Image (cartoon, helix red, strand yellow):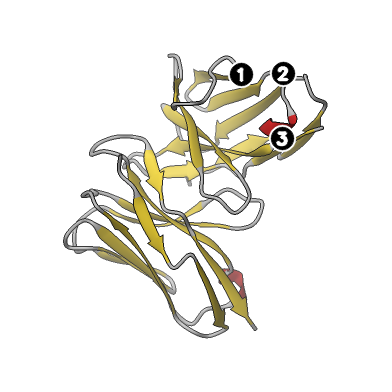
Amino acid sequence: GQQLNQSPQSMFIQEGEDVSMNCTSSSIFNTWLWYKQDPGEGPVLLIALYKAGELTSNGRLTAQFGITRKDSFLNISASIPSDVGIYFCAGPIIQGAQKLVFGQGTRLTINP
Amino acid sequence: GAVVSQHPSRVICKSGTSVKIECRSLDFQATTMFWYRQFPKQSLMLMATSNEGSKATYEQGVEKDKFLINHASLTLSTLTVTSAHPEDSSFYICSGQGGHNEQFFGPGTRLTVL
């Protein structure tokens, strides 16, 4: 079945640095979703992408839907301590399906 | 908008007892809800898809008689872990589906079975 390969698995950065993470798939996706999960909480939807080439921002976060439809990236600019958490990419398992497949997650740690 | 609540947020029970977890969509109607479990430092694992008014669809390897799902209304789905054992201890998360296939997650329920 479809799988999402998310990288890096973890990041250790200094406060104020920019962050970039990405997701790739061997299959085409029509939707890319980026979530953030804080410890002991459920994932929160950050950005949803529905069109190849789409570039969408949400505050300091920017995500892009790759032209090939097989990848997506998420950037965080000028990181702050509250950006700490685990970031997941996700997409529908098959076209038009309801079920999502998730990447393995990127754990972000910020040193003040 | 698109808020999902879960209750309880944390539960500790004895082995052999049953535990019910509620998932509610507070400001939207969710024809479809999903139940996940998550082990420490791992991604979310889909357990089942819950459709309002019909039987849930379980993922391979998930025992439907052990994890009973009821989706009686467009805003409420429940997951009952029957005869819970320590290996069922996990973080259980539900989600409601929005209009564009995005999913909105609840805050999760931490289940500890002694």
Image coordinates of residue A102 in percent, x first then y, are 42, 48
Earlier sequence position, callout 3 versus callout 1: 3
B61 lies above or below A10: above
Image coordinates of residue A11 in percent, x first then y, are 52, 73
The numbered mark at residue B8 is: 3
Q: Tag 2: Cα neighbours inside 10 Å, few (<14), some, or many (≥20)?
A: some
> Rounded to the nearest whole Å, what is the CA distance between mark 3 and mark 1?
19 Å
The numbered mark at residue B15 is: none
Say which quadrant the N terminus of chain A sits in. top left
- For the point 61% across and 75% down, the residue is A81
Image coordinates of residue A42 in percent, x first then y, are 58, 48
**Residue under circle 2?**
B83
Judge depth for marks 2 and 3 and give the one in front.
2
Residue type, label 1: Lys
Determine whether, in the image, residue B70 is placed left or right of residue B16: left
Mark 2 in CB contact with mark 1 (< 8 angstroms) = yes
SS for dot 1:
loop
> Pointer 3 indicates a residue of which chain?
B
Is B84 in front, or is B77? B84
**Residue under circle 1?**
B66
SS for dot 3:
loop
Say which quadrant the C terminus of chain A sits in. bottom right
Q: Tag 1: Cα neighbours inside 10 Å, few (<14), some, or many (≥20)?
A: some
Residue type, label 2: Ser
Is A36 in front, or is A107? A107
